Amino acid sequence: MTYADASRLFRQGRFREIIDGFKRLGSSATTDRQLSLLVAYVLALTDDTVAAAQLLKVDTNALAPTHRAQAEMTSGIISWRSGDHESALRQLQSAVRLASELQVPQLLGWASLHLFRCSIEIQTRDVVLGMLKDVRTNVTKAGDVGLTSYLHVCVAVFEGQRGQLDEATRHCDIAESLLDSSPNAWILGAALLNRSCVACLQCDFTRAADYARRVIALANVTGLLIQRGAAEIMSGYLQLLMGDFQKAEQTLTNLVSDSEFKHSTSPAADLLARVYLASGDLSKCERTLQLVKLSHDETGVEQLAYGARWAALTKAKLFMKHRDFHGALSWLQALETGSINLEDRPFKGTVDLLIAQSFHELGRGRECAGKMIRADHYGIRRSRDSQGHFQHSAGLMAADESPLLAHHLRERASRIWSSRSGVHQQ
């Protein structure tokens, strides 16, 4: 395994072959600094942060400037994967600055994209949008198909998290069309994972499951445990939505208990808690939620990654299942306050809907109505993923004042759910 061999495999996204080839070199592997740095980068991308950090145990001041920039970029990815967001941003920004000063277009492109992708998860919408022009410029200057296709994948993630599903699909289409001329299994897996999420939000569960299976198959080529874990989580979520609680519990329990999938533990635990919530096992739900990286102090929601924001809503639903509506309201209002500057409209709409339910149970009708109007403002009534929940909740709230209207609203919710391939009401 030479550096040239590893570079060729990297451009194809065949990370497993790079790692296996490096291991076969034995003790002589670390003598090639350029190769070691590339392998450390690949290990970080595959979520083997411990092995990646081990390879980076060098005096960075003794490295050539280009190698130092590469090491900073890899360190940033390691910090991001480890949950140290402050260090991740600092290191990735340093990598971008060094690569820019050195005028190394490829390295600048990748460093910019990793900073952009990390920021999508942990920064506000305005910050991310403010970065996009420079990221596009840096990627364009590099003139690399892999970089351009990964840029479109990143933008697809951003648009999907904002609820712009058509835009997310469009960027996935562009990414995959670019990959036709220059195949890359890693980037294709990322695009398919986005497609699976979008199909799920559109309640097209058959397509969502098919995309997830393709990502799992690609993981055998890429060695990307983080992609495989995300696809397994999607499989478990689809099983939950279809009401197959036993299969969902098995899928998600396997992920939570497998130390190889440490990056997937928190989101898998959230979904497993939802399985227990839906099946009525509230004690297991509460214990499982303790595995999710979330505390009441973290409800400054802008600091929470996309998945963790939604996990916070599972805890609110647990309060409500216990009929602790005061506790639910307190938790949800903290989330609402912390999400003032957040541009995740589906999330904010769902927060408002759950607050409305809490107000209803507490007999605060006027405030309940106000929150239902706000939830509608955020588009929840028109969201294929949430409109059934909205109609059903509205029906429950209207029951005392207008039983006939309440009946029609609940029937409408049932029709919506039945048209979504048997989706289970959570």
Image: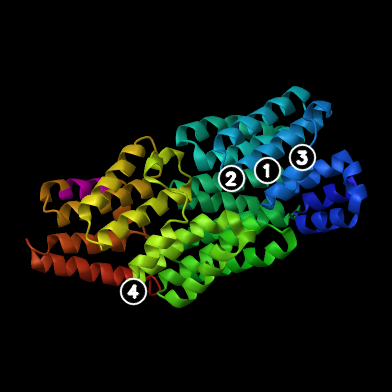
From the image, tell me which residue sits under label 3. 56
Q: How many numbered callouts?
A: 4
Left or right: residue 15 versus residue 230 is right
For the residues labelled 4 and 1, say whether their Cβ atoms are less than 8 Å apart: no
Label 4 is placed on what type of residue? Ser
Gap between marks 4 and 1 measured at Cα: 40 Å
Gap between marks 3 and 1 measured at Cα: 28 Å
Gap between marks 4 and 2 measured at Cα: 33 Å
Label 4 or label 3, whichever comes before in sequence order:
3
Mark nearer the viewer, 3 or 1 = 3
Secondary structure of residue under mark 4: helix
Residue 14, quarter of the rendered image: bottom right
Whole-percent x, y for residue 170 in the image:
55, 51
Label 4 or label 2, whichever comes before in sequence order:
2
Q: Give the magenta-colored segment's residue range.
A: 368-375
* Along the line of sight, the residue nearer the viewer: 1 or 328: 328
Q: Is residue 64 above or below residue 195?
A: above
Label 3 is placed on what type of residue? Leu
Q: Look at 75% across and 31% down and name the residue there.
A: 69
Most distant residue in the top direction = 101
Q: Main secondary structure of the magenta part?
A: helix
Q: Is residue 343 visible?
A: no
Whole-percent x, y for residue 283 in the image:
35, 66
From the image, tell me which residue sits under label 4. 418
From the image, tell me which residue sits under label 2. 154
Secondary structure of residue under mark 2: helix
* Along the line of sight, the residue nearer the viewer: 246 or 224: 246
